[in-house]
Image: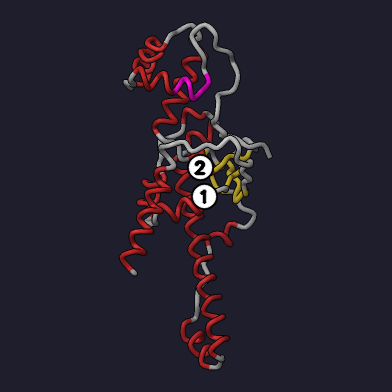
Amino acid sequence: SPAEAMSLREFLDRLYVRSEFQSTEDQSAPAVVYSSVAGIVLEDGRPALGFFNREIWKGRYLTDAARYRELKATLTPDEASNIEQFMRQVDRLAFRQTTLYRVLEYLIESQADYLVTGDLGRRRPLTQRDVAARLSVAPSVLNQIIANKSVEAPWHLEIPLKSLFPSRKTMMRDKLYDIAMERPNDGDNLLRQELRRLYGTTISRPSIIQYSKELGLGVAGQRGSGCRAGTGEVLSL
């Protein structure tokens, strides 16, 4: 029923948004394969989309409604049913294509500092829900559009689109990692104080402990200079 369909859609929206705030890593899952959809280049010091044919991405499929009605009148019922299914697929393709283009343009504008410098700390906190609202699409639609998609960054490495949607928690974890590597002998309380001094952010000690565990930082005085755990921010081409 319409009510049941609406309930199902709301459930899916909540499920996709929840994935931004709760880790669901499965160590036994196969490696994710990404599809590169665009390249990002620097033009006059600002990031820009570097498609092979930019106009194709900006275009839309349009239907000649009058001609479509004329054509359907000449078809058998089975043929008319087939062409209706085909036209619905064309409409979906046009919607996904233009929505992906709008998402890419919004991301390079929002994350310009990061894309110019390559510094993860220059990313802005950005949620899929906020971007979906800005572009007037459902969060579930946005999640599907960016799933397993990547772009080539100006420094010629492939980065997942989802890495351009860092949560505030992700940003704090990155800052904590940098501070912990610079001050390997500091305990949890000192790291917490340094976060507050540098960024004006107060984080509880249990959160510091949890972030340290997620990042694989270890205890004070025993930290190395290895890669942070579980970020998956960059893909090699």
Q: Nearer the viewer, residue 62 or 12?
A: 12
Q: Residue at x 51, y 86 (%)?
A: 67
**C-beta proximity under 8 Å, tags 1 and 2:** yes
The amino acid type, in three-letter code, at marker 1 is Ile
Image location (x, y in percent) of residue 111: 47, 38
* Display coloring: secondary structure
Residue sticking out furthest to the bottom = 74
Secondary element at image label 1 = helix
- Binning the other alpha carbons within 10 Å of mark 2 as few (below 14), some (14 to 19) or many (20 upward) gives some
Residue 163 image offset from top left, x and y in percent? 51, 38
Q: Quadrant of the C terminus?
A: top right
In three-dimensional space, the C-alpha distance between marks 1 and 2, rounded to whole angstroms, equals 7 Å
Q: Quadrant of the N terminus?
A: bottom left
Residue 142 position, x and y percent, is 45, 52
The magenta-colored residue range is 211-216
Q: Is residue 133 above or below residue 196?
A: below
Q: Which amino acid, by three-letter code, is at mark 2?
A: Lys
Q: Is residue 214 magenta?
A: yes
Question: What label sits on residue 162 in the rendered view?
Answer: 2
Q: Earlier in the sequence, mark 1 or mark 2?
A: 1
Q: Is residue 82 above or below residue 11?
A: below
Residue depicted at x 53% and y 35%: 116
Residue 146 is marked as: 1
The label number, if any, that marks residue 72 in the structure image? none
Task: Compare residues 92 and 8 and report the one nearer the observer.
Answer: 8
